[in-house]
Image: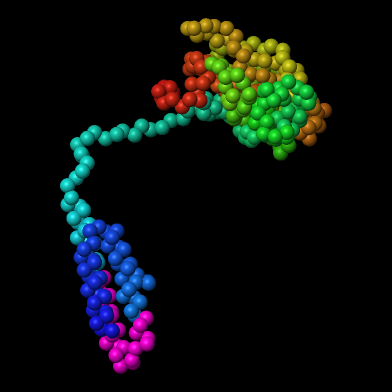
Amino acid sequence: MQQQIQSMMERALSEVAQATDPDALEETRIEYLGRKGKLTSLLRGLGSMDAAERPAAGQALNRAKEAVKVAVDERVTSLLSAQDDAPLTIDLTLPGRASRPGSLHVLPQIIEEICEIFHGMGYSRAVGPEVELDEFNFAKLNFPDDHPSRDLQDTFYVNDAVVMRTQTSPVQLRYMQEHEPPLAIVSPGRVYRHEQIDASHAAEFYQIEGLFVDHDVSLADLKSTIHAFIHALFGEDKKLRFRPHFFPFTEPSVEVDLWWESDRKSGWLEIMGAGMVHPHVFANAGYDPDRYTGFAFGMGIDRIAMVRHGIPDIRLLYENDLRFLRQF
Ligand code: PHE
């Protein structure tokens, strides 16, 4: 037994001495001293030995393990310091690579700005899912079954009952189902339409929905709110035009145009749809349409960002080209 211990220790010590890097050394350490290591398993052999020889063998084994352990520790230290002394393979005089601080994309920048303005008017912020039930995107918003925007040509269907929302208006219903009036919310987010993509049409873009519900709300409240908002965003001198329009979920409905002048052109620019919440929508949300009145509006955020910054093509907003994005 003594001899076995002695020769095992010598083998271990010579392997330790030959290890050329810390990883190999660690393997050697585990091979001999690990829980199932070669020296460790000799310990188990002690049980079957003569009681008279056992103490001496046990002591020899402990000394061997200790010797190997000390050798491993010394070798680690010398390998690591050799690594430290190795000639540098990098050039410390090269200039560093500056890390630029990131910034918000121009769309979330505008979204924050818009929400902040409405926050100042007492509106809170709501969110809704982008993968939406047909029921909320269309049916409960008073769209008839054969409405053209339900067409496969215009809407991305997930299945018969589920669509990629084509507008943020379903958030109106989801919010009203969970809350009692009076309420004032804005809800920004992505919407999806099966568009022919060009400089002013993308298949995904952003809208922000607004909803205000209380007693005795009138179209005059809608107009003054939109005026206050546009003046806060673009300046007091900005002119708006409200044109009669149709949406299934508001009655009466309007489209709002902003007079815009730039170096390239000037004219009325359509910026949002709006109107008085249709009584059917109130009923579908569980509100009594005889008790409550309200207005809603839905605005294209991309359009707002584009006129604000003179961006000529909506696709620039989605290409993630840093040369473009770093300008904002
Ligand atoms: N959801 C309408 C659209 O996408 C806009 C709108 C919102 C109109 C709210 C009226 C009220 O065109």
Does the stretch in magenta take in 190? Answer: no
Picture residue at 23% right of the left edge, 79% below the top: 6
Which one is nearer the viewer's eye here, 163 or 228? 163
Is 262 on the left-hand or right-hand side of 60?
right
Residue found at the far right of this picture:
290
The majority secondary structure of the magenta stretch comes to: helix
In terms of image quadrants, where is residue 157? top right
Extent of the magenta region: 44-69
Type of colouring: rainbow
- List x then y, in percent, for residue 91: 20, 39
Does the stretch in magenta take in 53? Answer: yes
- List x then y, in percent, for residue 10: 22, 74
In terms of image quadrants, where is residue 189? top right
Picture residue at 37% right of the left edge, 87% below the top: 48
Residue 232 seen anywhere in this rendered image of the structure: no
Residue 102 seen anywhere in this rendered image of the structure: yes
Picture residue at 57% right of the left edge, 28% below the top: 115
- List x then y, in percent, for residue 82: 18, 55
